[in-house]
Amino acid sequence: MSEAVSDPQAAKPPSDAWRAVRRLLREPLGVLGLTLVLLMVGGAIFADLLTSWDPTRINPRDRFLGPGAEHLLGTDQLGRDLFARVLHGGRVALSVALIATGISLVIGIMLGLIAGYGPRWLDNLMILLFDSVKSFPTVMLALALVTLFGPSLTSVVIVVVLVTVPGYARIIRTQTIALKNSEYVTAARSMGASPARILRVHILPNVIGPLVILASMDIPVVIGIEAGMSFLGLGVRPPTPSWGSILNDGFTSIRDTPWIAVAGGIPIILVTLGFTFLGETLRDVFDPRLKAR
Amino acid sequence: MRQPFGQPSRRSVLAGLGAFGVAASAMPRMAISQDGRVLRVRSYSDLQVLDPAFWVSLPEADIITAIYPPLVAPMPGDVWSWKTVAAKSIEQIDDLTVAFELLDGITFSGGHGKMTAEDVKFSIERIADPDNESPYAGDWSALDQVEVTGELTGLIRLKTPFVPLWTTTLPTPASCIVSKAAFEAAGGQVTTDPVAMSGHYLLTEWVPKQRTVLTRNPDWPGEPGGFEEIHIIPIEDPATAELGFEAGDLDYTWTAVSSLPRLKEDPPAGSVVLEKPSLAYVWLGMNEAVAPFDNPNIRRAVQHAIDRQLVVDAAYYGAAELGNGLVAPGLPGSRDGVTYDYDPDRARELLEQEGATGITVTLDILNQSERLLAAQVIQANLADVGINAEIKQNDSGTFWSLGASDSPDYDTMQMYLQRFSMQPDPSWATVWFTPEQIGVWNWSRFDNARFKELHDMGLVEADETKRDAIYREMQDLMDESGSFVFFTHEVVGVVHSEDIAPGLKPNGEPLLTEFKSA
């Protein structure tokens, strides 16, 4: 005991990250969100370990089986195991969400920094561009792109990037404008720092935090876009399972069995709730001023 | 804190929506047709061309025959026969001559005057004229000329006897009469903006992808149409249409074949479910002009790779029988089997022989649930022999023009899953696979001189036994090409409100002018 007290490491105050985790774990909704997210992500990563069924193996003689010991969530209209399809569909949803959100963040940050720090005419031009892209209805944009490139995972990612980049870029631009005349940026500029260094070292670290939290809250939106496009036949190609295509199968077979629609809908609901609860709690933890809003 | 009145909270909005939902669900199924004014029917595709010489899909043919009266039309009921519409009388005088007299008093809308025999001559000859490149020129391939003998009378003269004249030519849009003056003024053809209508109904509104409205023609001199208005709602997916019917948004719809067992067992309240024998044919086609299907052995490998019975069972839930060609049972040329069998080992052998193991191909389908189910079984069968098939779902506008020579997909499309509707004569099926149809409806670009020769023979051969042999041989030639895998003729499922009496052909296809209130 005395050794522990004398240990300088033990006396060191907990880090910001650890304090944030502890605060997150004190929030019931945060814990629920984290649990749901871990469950869905874990299910997607370990899909091959959690089920032995091939999600694309068809067996029409076993169509529309209800949930049971052999098929935990039953089977679809082609006799495919729904549990396996839901788990593997999670891979599609989460990989689209992570890849598309990551690309959107990178592009949005770069464009936002350029718009906010650059000359006025460039700012005006980029705002016009952001608003033009943003004004396209998502479904129309998706239809146009799928007509050009055909339905695929790549098309889904392009749609998501186009839909989300303007929002991220606008936020970064606003914060960059607010910071570019602050004293420490002016000081750096007077000491001869290049615009690239000012943006990278002095502005970016101060604007990126809230954006990452915002992006985590956008993940359900992205998953919704992917599911919606796959529901309409514009997303991933069959037989690759996707929550949206499972939902579509459920829709067309709703009078034969409700289980397909349930199997496709539940993960979308859970992952949406999970990321929303987690994102809101993270936002409250990192920026308590926003909690009251 | 309470929200001030007029600023609804999220909770109050949700409560309001919930109350609305409960109230809506408590209301009885509404049907506008109950007052006998408006009929709402579903079509499986939207309009593209409303021209008797150039129509694209069956729903367009329904509308065309409602706005441009044909000389004769199919009789509603369970037996294939016909009745006069624009013709007051029509009869075959000899093998090469048909005499007709028009109903007096048919007038074209838009001030284009009275329908005369000159209009009949113009309407028929423009379809037959090779210069016009009508895809339905084959319907009038035996036509010599239409001779006008009076204001309302004329003779249809044929070069050779033409057996399908009374089954698949006259009772179809091929005998619809348009105004010569109006069509010439419109540049020779129309698309979605028809001119000078004169049938039971007039097209009064078209909202793309939403509805087409036909309004009863007050000037039609014969028996009037059964409804003041017919609203035609394009809904591609039959499952969606069934939900629309059950929600009370439709009075009549075709159903998915796979839904028939369930609907027959438990029909929606206030509805009638019908099952009709279908003449349609569903097949997988391969494009002989595009690699890898320019190699006949790879096409044959696909034929051997596909378990046709499994495809049909999976896509239609056992409601449809396996089909063996273009020609449905009961018509001359119907076959009991195909000339290839399900033999995945043979398919692997052929692929290995051609060095084509592990190839990737694209399968184009219409974005519709039964097609998607069938395509996924085909995909699994092909994967089993080492062919990776990527399914490409297309909306109807894109899909129906895939094989046209002016389509951007013309030189890239590899495989397609297709369904054609059919009239009660085998020549109406074989005509689409003749060399003249390459770039139009012959998407496989199947080019066989013997097939064409047999097709021409079938048009003039009156002996049923000989016709049977002709059409069997033609389908055998299609099998031998390797480019076709035949699946089924389906059945037609229809569900309609008890408040209407639908006018249906024996195969369940609608005759809009024959729908009445019950």
Image: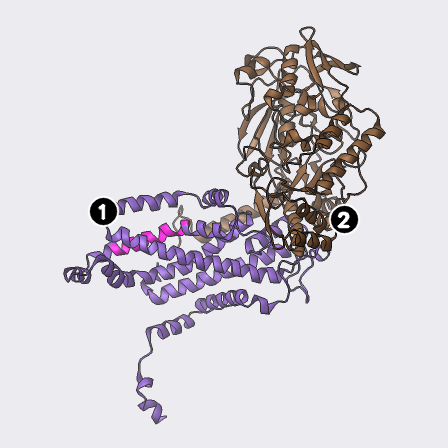
Chain colours: A purple, B brown
Res. B341 mark: 2
Identify which residue, B462 or B8, lies in the foreground: B462
Say which element carries label 1: helix
Disc 2 chain ID: B
The span picked out in magenta is: A162-176
Question: Label 2 to label 1, Cα distance in Å?
Answer: 72 Å
User: Horizontally, is B161 left or right of B20 in the view?
Assistant: right
Instruction: Tell me whether circle 2 and circle 1 mark residues in contact (CB < 8 Å).
Output: no
Q: Position of residue A97 (x, y in %)?
A: 46, 58
Name the residue nearer the viewer: A270 or A76.
A76
Residue B432's image quarter?
top right
- In the figure, B179 relative to B443: above or below? above
* Mark nearer the viewer, 2 or 1: 2
Q: Main secondary structure of the magenta part?
A: helix
Along the viewing direction, whichever of B456 and A27 lies nearer the viewer: B456
Amino acid, disc 2: Asp
Q: Name which residue lies at 37% across and 61% down.
A: A212
The answer to which of B501 and B293 lies nearer the viewer is: B293
Looking at the image, is B90 positioned above or below residue B135?
Answer: above
Asked if both marks, 2 and 1, belong to the same chain, the answer given is no
Image location of residue B453, percent across then percent down: 73, 28
- The chain ID associated with circle 1 is A
> Which residue is located at x 22 percent, y 48 percent?
A119
Q: Helix, strand, or loop for circle 2?
A: loop
In this view, the residue farthest toward the bottom is A2
Mark 1 sits on what residue? A120
Could you tell me the amino acid type at mark 1? Answer: Arg
Q: Please state, as top left, top right, bottom left or bottom right, where the C terminus of chain B lies in the image.
A: top right
